[in-house]
Every structure is written in C-alpha cells, then in structure tokens.
Amino acid sequence: MNKLGRLQKISMGYLSALVILMLYYVLHSAEASIDSSEILSVPSAKFWLGTDSLGRDYLLRVAQGGLLTLGLTTMSTLFAIFLGVGLGFLSGWSRRWISEAILRLMDFIQTVPSLVLAALIFFVSKSYLTTVSSEMSSWISLFACLVLTQWISPARLIRHEVMKIRSEPYIEASFSIGATSLQIFKSHLLPALLKTIILLFGLELPKHIFFESFLSFIGFGFQPPLSSWGGLIQEGWKHLSSSAYLTFIPLFFVITFVWAMNNVFSQWRHQSDRPGFF
C-alpha cells in the first residue's frame, strides 16, 4: 500500500508539473514562427526539443498540442459521462419501454466498430459546419466523435449500479411512504453513485486521450498549423527515418500522461472501498 501511495504521489506530481509547465511555456512564448535556417534541428540549448519540418520550436508545439489534447478530451469525457449517466439512469430506473429502447440503442452502437462510427460522425459533422472556421469545425467534429462513441461504458456501469440500488429494500420502503423518484434520486441514488461517477472520469479520460490521438494520427484531427499530440505524431511520422524525435516526443507524453492518470485513479479506486472515503 505504501508503494502504491508513493506511486500515486509521483504520478500526481508529474501530471501537475506537466500541465503547469505547458501552460507557462505557451503563455510566455511568442507564436512559433517559421525559420528555414532551423529546419529539423536536433534538440539543443536553443531548442530544447529541436524544431519541426518548418523550423518551428518543437517544445512550443508540443506544449500547445498537449493543452489542445487535454482541453478537448477533458470536455469530451465530462460530456460522455453526463450523457452516459443520464441514459444509464433512465435505463436502470425505468421498467417500461424506455429501458428496453436505451438498451437496444447501446447494443446497436456497440456492434459498429468505434473507428467506423467515429469516421461517419466526423464526416457528417464536418459537412454541416461549413460556416465556421476550420479549427472550430475540427474541434466540434472531434468532440462529437469522442462523446458519441465513448458514452456506452459509463451508461452500462451506471445502469448496473442503479438496478442494484433499486432492488434494495430501503428503496421500496421509500416508495411505500410516498417518496417521489426525484426525492429518492437526491437522497439515495446520487450519494451512492457519486463515487462511481468521479472514478469514471479517471477511467474514461485516458481512453479519450488515446482515441483522440489515434483519430488525429490517421487524419481525423485538427488541420496544421493547429495540432494535438496525435497530430504531431502524424506529422513526425513523415520524417521518422531522419528525425525520429518528432514522432517519439509527443508519443512519450501521450503514454506517460495516460500511465500517470491510471496510477492516480487506480489508487483512488482501492482507497474508495474504505468507509468514509467520500
């Protein structure tokens, strides 16, 4: 347990330091400018992470890409959990056709490969966003891809928890004395589900980061000069033989950020079983 505790602290320190340093560097640096004399320069004292194929400071681009990735995936994770909790609650609480309809919808979506569904959502949303900027169009399209393909797991988990709580004797007793569904939700269900919802965020955010990075890598992402970590990996892939650092630096941050997130929330998941954790 002590070892897990130390690992959790190290991971939390790494996550906090990485986000703060990225924010600081982006806010205190000029916009990355093109410099033909510094094209594909290796890491040095002047450019700590080298430069890209246009001579731009790669550290600044990695910091900007990281903030873009984390901002987008944090929002998409919250919205996917919100959607999943809402539909999961309706499915688990209702004993009418609503429950069956939501369950069949989840089954249908899960039969479609996530990549195929994401590609369909991306192209459809892009076709309807012709009046906004390319950056905003890409942001909304990626956001829709992540939310609409990743809400199923939270919904199924919440449905299971709600059905388990609904069968408890104290819920039936509450109904028998005239309590409404809203009153029962506020006094019993919400406190019981709060821990699950918080832990869901830690479980789902790494999935969103990986999926967004993969979508950006295969071309369903932001258009240059705006690039997330996945987009930077895709850009660097073109120069893998000559400048491998362009690929491996953003890939390193994707992997280590997800690793640290898993460490933090795995420990919290263990601790949440103790009485009085929340």
Image (spheres, rainbow, N blue to C red):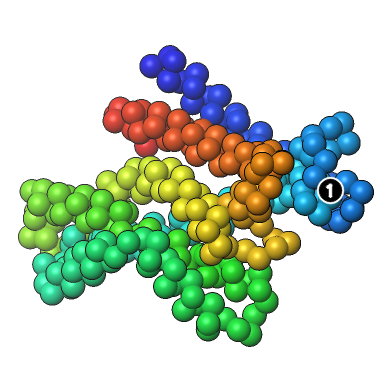
Task: Give left or right: position of 233 versus 43.
Answer: left
Residue sitting at the far right:
37
Q: Position of residue 248 (x, y in %)?
A: 62, 39
Residue sitting at the far front:
241
- Residue at image point 11% right, 72% down: 96
Task: Give left or right: position of 257 versus 21.
Answer: left
Q: Position of residue 89 (x, y in %)?
A: 25, 61
Question: Please, is residue 62 above or below residue 86 in the view?
Answer: above
* Count of number-bearing discs: 1
Residue 59: quadrant of the picture: top right
Task: Give left or right: position of 278 versus 169.
Answer: right
Q: Nearer the viewer, residue 74 or 127?
A: 127
- Residue at image point 53% right, 83% down: 128
Estimate how packed mark 1 is, as few (under 14), some (14 to 19) or many (20 or more) residues with alpha carbons within 10 Å: some
- Residue at image point 26% right, 51% down: 157
- Residue at image point 34% right, 28% down: 270
What amino acid is at disc 1?
Ile
Residue 101: quadrant of the picture: bottom left
Q: Quadrant of the N terminus?
A: top left
Secondary structure of the residue carrying numbered label 1: loop
Residue sitting at the far top:
2
Residue bearing the label numbered 1: 39
Residue 117: quadrant of the picture: bottom left
Q: Position of residue 184 (x, y in %)?
A: 22, 58
